[in-house]
Image (tube, grey):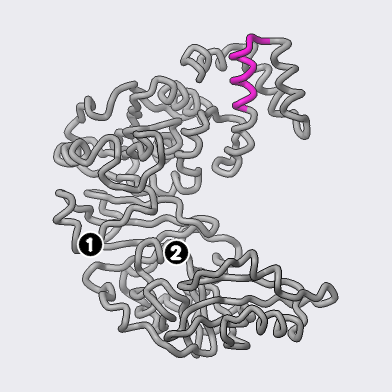
Amino acid sequence: MFSVDNYQWLDSLEARTTWESLCSEQGKSSSALLNQLRAKFPVEHASLLMEQWELCSLASRKVSDPERWFWTRQLLEQASDEATAQETAADFDPGTKVVDICCGAGADSIALAKRGANVQSIDRCPIACWLASHNARQQRVSIDVVSQAAEDCILQPNAFIHIDPDRRADGSRSNQFERLSPNWTTISKMLESCKGMSLKLGPGHRIAWNQLPQQVDHPPESIRFIAKDGTVRQQRWSWGLGRWPRNSITVSMLLNERSRKNAETFSELHANRNDAETLYKENWFHETFLQSTMVRHVGDVTVDQVGDYVADYDPSLRAAELSPSFAARYGWNLLHSGSGYLSSDRPTIHPLVRWYRVLENVPLDRKHLKVLSKQLSVKRWELKSRGVDVDLDAMRKILVTDRASERGLSILFTEIGDSHRALICDETDVHYA
């Protein structure tokens, strides 16, 4: 464990010069670099530089200029990625006073400052505070950093709060609401004295809308699930921010090249809609569901027969338990359960959905699938499962491939009625509404 003094040394001229040299070292072994550093610096300084060099590679998945950031390993794991931090900072109006509590290494604080907020960053850990200050300077923004426990924070009456409670207070990651630090009692008191709040939670936290009044005072006005690169990055509860409708759940997805084209087409097809259900803006697609319009009974949209097409969809909808509401909104059905595949005889384009044309609907039988895979002459198999416990790696090994073929097919495993089925499918682009 490194001390604050060790991290402060990173700002020295010799450390900065060495860091610039390290950042240019590509393809060199870590052991060779460490030996090189130990020949020049005390052990703790050499080890800290080496750790930052290793973290720089990991940070490239989260920030666009990783060489301009310093971290601890845990704070990097907990930090919002750059795109998500910028998107959630947009929940706050420029010029507002925002207190970022449990700021960590400063990813969200910096995004808020770039948004134009007046940011005070608070963390009980002195090392986190130093990192947040350093990273803000490197990003050329100003934040006021205070080393303080959240419980001791005294808020100005016009302040908004961004808070990312520690979910590892007892050493292990947890999605249990009662294990947050600071705890809900402290957060609730903050709510009573601030203008608004954005509470960052892990995507695994589950509290049903109809149970919220019994489980927490001050239920959130809105909830948002944020997805990027096929994974759900975080869940946000908000109060007093106004960007999202009250009593709503929104899923937000950062678009890639393919989904962006679908979002553009979808927006053109639905240009005359005058509701606030969907929003495509600045590479993000948002879909909002009001609590009053959510489908309560899964049986209303589930079927036991497969249509000509089936679809998989963004995991944020499953995390938010919105699959039935999503299916009902667009006139699709669900196979098997409230989180199963979509099914339709006529697919429609949507940026959160991947459609597959069903070629074969067969029992989930390993021998039969092996024979069928040989007959179909396929080079690449994509395997997915919803509602059926299948060892996909073991299943992949029994499927026959043909290197001479250019064909790629998918097998979607699902439960239909009382039967486990394998749907042999060809992924398709939808060109019509």
Instruction: Name the residue carrying label 2.
Output: 280
Residue drawn at x 55%, y 16% is 11
Q: Secondary structure at mark 2?
A: strand
Range covered by the magenta-colored residues: 41-52
Q: Position of residue 106 (x, y in %)?
A: 43, 32
Q: Position of residue 331 (x, y in %)?
A: 39, 84
Q: Which quarter of the picture shows residue 430?
A: bottom right
Horizontally, is 302 left or right of 186 in the view? right
Instruction: Name the residue carrying label 1.
Output: 209
Horizontally, is 130 left or right of 121 in the view? right
Q: Residue 70 or 208: which is nearer the viewer?
A: 208
Residue drawn at x 50%, y 89% is 307
Q: Which quarter of the picture shows residue 259?
A: bottom right
Which mark, by number, is residue 319?
Answer: none
Q: Nearer the viewer, mark 1 or mark 2?
A: 1
In reply to whether residue 42 is colored magenta, the answer given is: yes
Q: Which quarter of the picture shows residue 361?
A: bottom right
Q: Residue 319 or 258: which is nearer the viewer?
A: 319
Q: Position of residue 391 (x, y in %)?
A: 58, 66
